[in-house]
Amino acid sequence: MSIFEHMRKNNSRELLFFEEQSLKLKAIIAVDSIVLGPANASAKLFHYKNEDDAIADALDIAYYNSLRAALLKRGMGGAAIILIGNPKEVKSEMYFRALGIFLNRWNGKLFMSISKGVSYKDLKYVRKESEYILGMEKAHGGLGQIYVNRAKGMIKGMKAIAKHKLKSGSLKGLKIVVQGVGDLGSQLVRQLIEEGADLTVTDKIYDRIKIVQDRVEDIKIEKPEKIYETKCDIFCSCAAEKMIDTEAVTKLKCKIFTGGTNQPLKKLEDIEILKQNGILYVPGYIINGGDIIQMTNEIEGYKNDKVENELDDIYRIVSDLLEEADTSNTDLCKLAIDKAEEYVTGVSAIKMLR
């Protein structure tokens, strides 16, 4: 697929390439939109099979960052920074400081946030050269790790979904599967335990499972290949994007399918299989915007008490979308995307009046 064909898929506007050979730094920067405000550029460091996969990932992440912000009606655009390479081989202080210098060229229109393969230690190196960083730990001037508020927002969203589908205003006692216990999944597990949920978790990396097990003795563990057959109220995917194929979808034995992953389905056509099996599908981008709420408040100079209050917006938005989708007999995913696009179009029209 050509670069422009990739871009047309999500109507993305801008794609840039940045390289510093002496530091083994190869970056792809996708900017989906800055209509609503400066763009949140999730930075992901990964050893891709080829550059084509890296470009596709950059454009998808940028698109979903835009979509999540628009659904929440926040003043933030969407972007992505894809760093190509083996994290064990390319990481260094100068690698990330060079990335900070690149960020400065955008003069505040692009802010970097953390994602897979990038640590808070790495962010501190970027910070030595650039102030355009979001989600820094409190000790370093930020509002804390973004995974905490992303998980908090998901809890709000899951409560709204449970009330709609299961007629339960609480997650207490509900059987919930968490697939993937990395940075986000492990944080979500901690919060679900506090909610009193009956948890089963899985991950392809055993060390992650061991960490969770050490903290919660009675948590249930299932093998990755068997997890889809686990009977539960909510199946929550926090694993890789587009990982769940048609065969796995047919095995699901849940009532609700959601998660922190923006789009876990390999094929969107499989939504029909979920509907036929009576499973309510709520993609991650509808409930996982707690980090967006944190980061927009961080840019505007507000503190965590305001973030905590605004996380309730996720419950309200999810509830409204579910009710409207039912009332109008509209596909939930299409409705959410239409609402987001309508908001961006409205803001764009207003800005033309200036």
Image: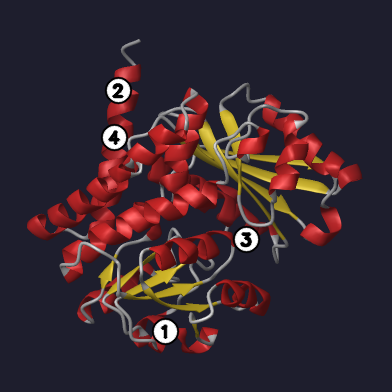
Q: Name the residue under label 1.
A: 228
Along the polypeptide, which appears first: circle 1 or circle 4? 1
Q: Earlier in the sequence, mark 1 or mark 2?
A: 1
Residue type at numbered disc 3:
Asp
Residue 348, placed above or below residue 39: above
Q: Residue 71 at what x, y percent from top left?
A: 32, 43
Q: Quadrant of residue 133?
A: top right
Check disc 3 and report the residue beneath it: 53
Q: Distance between the residues labelled 1 and 4?
A: 36 Å
Q: Measured along the vertical axis of the image, is residue 285 above or below residue 354?
A: below
- Report crowding for label 1: few under 14, some 14 to 19, many 20 or more residues within 10 A (C-alpha): many
Q: Name the residue under label 2.
A: 349
Q: How crowded is mark 2: few (under 14 residues within 10 Å), some or many (20 or more)?
A: few
SS for tag 4? Answer: helix
Instruction: Tell me how far mark 2 sits from mark 4, CA to CA.
Output: 10 Å
1 or 2: mark nearer the eye: 1
45 to the left or right of 312:
right
Percent across and percent down for residue 63 are 46, 47
Amino acid identity at mark 2: Ala
Mark-to-mark CA distance, 1 and 3: 26 Å
Pick whichever, 313 or 272, lies toward us: 313
Q: Residue 343 carries which label?
A: 4
CA–CA distance between discs 3 and 4? Answer: 30 Å
Give whichever of discs 3 and 4 has the lower sequence position.
3
Q: Residue at x 54, y 65 (%)?
A: 186
Q: Earlier in the sequence, mark 1 or mark 3?
A: 3
